[in-house]
Image (spheres, helix red, strand yellow):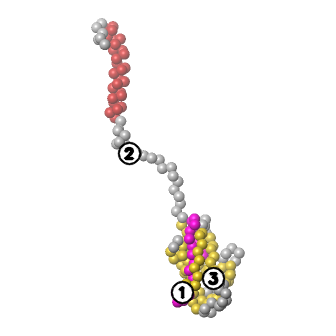
């Protein structure tokens, strides 16, 4: 392109050149100030909702000779006859899903009389029942039921058969 020689041509040329130069300068300025993508740490928005931790605990263990309609112990006692069915009621607090709860019944010499388990999914305070019975007479002596929650001992209750 040939440079304008007359004053009129130069002012007309400058009128078109000035915005082009300003635009190019602005682009260079923005490019120089912009951080490179590699320098900017990637951020992501966490849209997951935290899941509450399931926590179930044993609040109380009772033994007795029967159950009420709400599964609580009827005739709570620590002394049983040789022909009694023995009930253990476990009161739990908290919430959980498919939480293993077990009862291990032992005689005074450590011999395991019975073991049973159930999967519980409480949504607050709850009552769970275990029991043992025998067609023949129970040997007289001291017994213990151990309640196991999530594979760990959650408490014991001793009782006697007279």
Whether residue 5 sits left or right of residue 58 in the image: it is left
The label nearer to you, 3 versus 2, is 3
- Where 139 falls versus 9 (above or below)? below
x%, y% of residue 77?
A: 63, 85
Residue stretch rendered in magenta on the structure: 90-110
Mark 1, residue position: 111
Residue 42 place in picture, x, y as percent: 40, 45
Which of the numbered marks, if any, corresponds to residue 132? 3
Q: Is residue 59 visible?
A: no
Q: Is residue 86 magenta?
A: no
Q: Which mark is residue 41?
A: 2
| Residue 126 shows up from this direction | yes
Lower position in the chain sequence, tag 1 or tag 2:
2
> Which image quadrant is residue 114 in?
bottom right
Q: Is residue 38 above or below residue 139?
A: above
The one of 132 and 57 positioned closer to us in this rendering: 132
- In the image, residue 95 above or below residue 91: above
Work out whether 100 lies above or below 28. below
């Amino acid at each position: 392109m040939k440079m304008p020689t007359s004053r009129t041509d130069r002012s007309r040329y400058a009128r078109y050149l000035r915005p082009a130069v300003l635009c190019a300068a602005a682009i260079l300025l923005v490019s120089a100030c912009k951080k490179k993508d590699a320098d900017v740490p990637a951020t992501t928005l966490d849209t997951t909702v935290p899941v509450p931790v399931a926590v179930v605990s044993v609040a109380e263990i009772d033994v007795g000779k029967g159950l009420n309609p709400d599964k609580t112990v009827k005739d709570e006692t620590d002394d049983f006859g040789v022909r009694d069915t023995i009930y253990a009621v476990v009161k739990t607090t908290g919430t959980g899903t498919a939480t293993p709860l077990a009862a291990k019944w032992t005689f005074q010499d450590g011999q395991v009389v019975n073991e049973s388990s159930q999967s519980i999914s409480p949504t607050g305070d709850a009552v769970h029942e275990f029991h043992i019975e025998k067609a023949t007479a129970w040997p007289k002596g001291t017994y213990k039921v151990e309640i196991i929650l999530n594979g760990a001992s959650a408490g014991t209750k001793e009782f006697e058969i007279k």
